[in-house]
Image: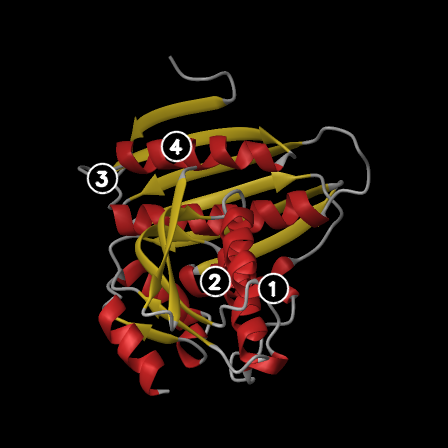
Amino acid sequence: MEIKIETKSLEEIAQVIEVQGEIDVYTSPRVKEIITELIEKGNYNLIINLEGVRYIDSTGLGILIGALKRVREKDGCINLVCNNPQIKKIFNITGLVKIFGIFKSEEEAFSSLKSA
Amino acid sequence: MLPENVFFSPYESKNPGNKALNKTIIIKNRLEEIDILAEEAGEFCNTAGIEKRDALRIRLILEELIVNTISYGYTDESEHEISVDLNKNGEQVEITIKEDSVPFDPFQAEPPDLESPLEERKTGGHGIHLVKNLSESLIYHSADNINTTTITFLTGKTG
């Protein structure tokens, strides 16, 4: 299982976490580590770009929910970028569409975050 | 050459033109073995002509159930075997998992509350909910210290 994670800052307002590969029981700890590092450095507005993700399991979903809980405590927000119908189906089944903003592009996710 | 823990046997179905395939994968009760399971299940799906979308769902069903078993099902440090039988006949894939962990019917577990606000949401508990929603039928039974979970999955469904 391979995963590639890159981060970048958007106008010093949000941090983008771009994930490529599979988020499963092996790779989830790495995703959690990166998100936790950003939150501990005071970044509470995150955009997680899942465009390069072809597989996510319940461990990965748990990481996303845990991260959202942490940033909300600081009045932050996590928006997701996802167009993959397979991944979106998993978000639908588990009701995550109701708690995450899910956008078609980083630009849309960022605009929503700025106007929140 | 196939690894020792894989048995792969294509055979012709009784229905003309309806090719059936069967594969048995045996792994140890270690999370590292999930990698082997994913690879072998993927190979089965390729050979059986199962489209990528359905192959990913089959993999998700397998991983959710077996990661749960490996993570919570054993009370000793001994090595145990988990057997996974994949059988495609027509549009249907039947998955049978046999293992000797502590008896636990995963399908009796309380479903997550998908309507609850974020503060009350649990980070876990979504795996079995996913399995239930992606499968056509689920049967669990335990006898003679062997737990058998049988899942049927219909390929080619829209949505």
Marks 3 and 2, Cα distance to the nearest angstrom? 29 Å
**In the rendered view, does B120 fall on the left or right side of B127?**
right
Name the disc covering residue B22, or none.
Answer: 4
Q: Nearer the viewer, residue A48 or A41?
A: A41
Name which residue lies at 65% across and 66% down.
B109
* Mark positioned earlier in the residue sequence (1 or 2): 1
Dot 2 lies on which element?
helix
Q: Which mark's residue is nearer the viewer, 3 or 4? A: 4
Residue highlighted by disc 1? B124
Tell me the chain of label 2.
Answer: B
* Mark positioned earlier in the residue sequence (4 or 1): 4
Residue highlighted by disc 2? B130
Name which residue lies at 76% across and 47% down.
B102
**Percent position of residue B115, x then y:** 52, 84
A11 above or below A29?
Answer: below
Marks 3 and 4, Cα distance to the nearest angstrom? 13 Å
Marks 4 and 1, Cα distance to the nearest angstrom? 33 Å
